Amino acid sequence: MKSSKTDIVILPATAQDAPFIARNILDAMGVKEISGMHKELTEICRKEDTLYSWKRTYIVQVGGTPAGSLTSYDGAMYKELKDRTFSIISAKTGEDYSEVGEETRPDEYYLDSLAIIPEYRFHHLGSLLIDNALHIAQGLGFTLVSLIAEKDKVWLQHYYESLGFYADGELLFFGHQYVRMIQEI
C-alpha cells in the first residue's frame, strides 16, 4: 500500500456501503467463505435498526478506496438491536440465535466489528478507526468503551492492549470464549 497520511480519511458509512460493511462484518467474525451469507448480511447492513447498520459504521478510505470499517454503538441499544438482527438472521437460516450471549453492557460504548481489507493491514488503519470511535464515545458522554477478542487470539489481545484496552474477564459468545476488554476514557 502506497499512501501518505493525507489520503487516509474516515467517513460515516452510507446505505450504499452495505455490501462493503457486510464483507467486513463477516471477516471480523472469522467467516472465510462469505458468498453464502453476504447477500443476507448486506440486507441487514442496509437497515437502520440493526446491530450492523450502516448508521453505526465508519469506513476508512485510502486514496478514495474503502480499506476497512468499524461498527460501534451505545451498549444500551444492544439488546433491542441484537434481538431484531438475529431474528432476521433466524428467519433466513431457520437457526435459533436467541441464546448467542451478551457482548456489551448498557453503560458503555461498544466496538462491535472491526475489519481491515488484507492488502491494507499493518498500516495502523484499525487504530485510526478505534481512535475515531473513542472520540465519538467521549463526545456522547461515555466514560467506558468495550470490545471482545477471541481468547485464543492472544496477538489480537496484545494489539488492543497497545491501544489502551485491558482485560476485564471472559465471556461465552456464539459458543466461543472471548476476553472482554475495556478502556476508560
Image: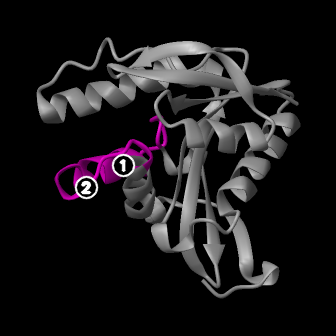
- The answer for how far apart the CA atoms under marks 1 and 2 are is 7 Å
Choose top left, top right, bottom left or bottom right for residue 82.
top left
- Within 10 Å of disc 2 (Cα), the crowding (few <14, some 14-19, many 20+) is some
Q: Is residue 151 left or right of residue 159?
A: left
The magenta stretch spans residue 41: yes
* Image: 47 above or below 59: above
User: Which amino acid is tagged 2?
Assistant: Ile
- Res 105 label: none
Image x and y of residue 58, in percent:
63, 55
Q: Position of residue 3 (x, y in %)?
A: 70, 85
Confirm or deny contact between disc 1 and disc 2 (CB under 8 A): yes
Residue at 56 percent across and 36 percent down: it is 154
Q: What residue would you read off at disc 2?
A: 34
Q: Earlier in the sequence, mark 1 or mark 2?
A: 1
Using residue 105 as the reference point, say whether residue 35 is left or right of it. left
- Quick one: SS at disc 2? loop
* Residue topped by disc 1: 26
The amino acid type, in three-letter code, at marker 1 is Leu
- Residue at 79 percent across and 50 percent down: it is 131
* Residue at disc 1, secondary structure: helix
Taking the spot 15% from the left edge, 24% from the top edge, the residue there is 95
Q: Nearer the viewer, residue 119 or 129?
A: 119
Q: Is residue 11 magenta?
A: no
Q: How many marks?
A: 2
The magenta-colored residue range is: 28-52
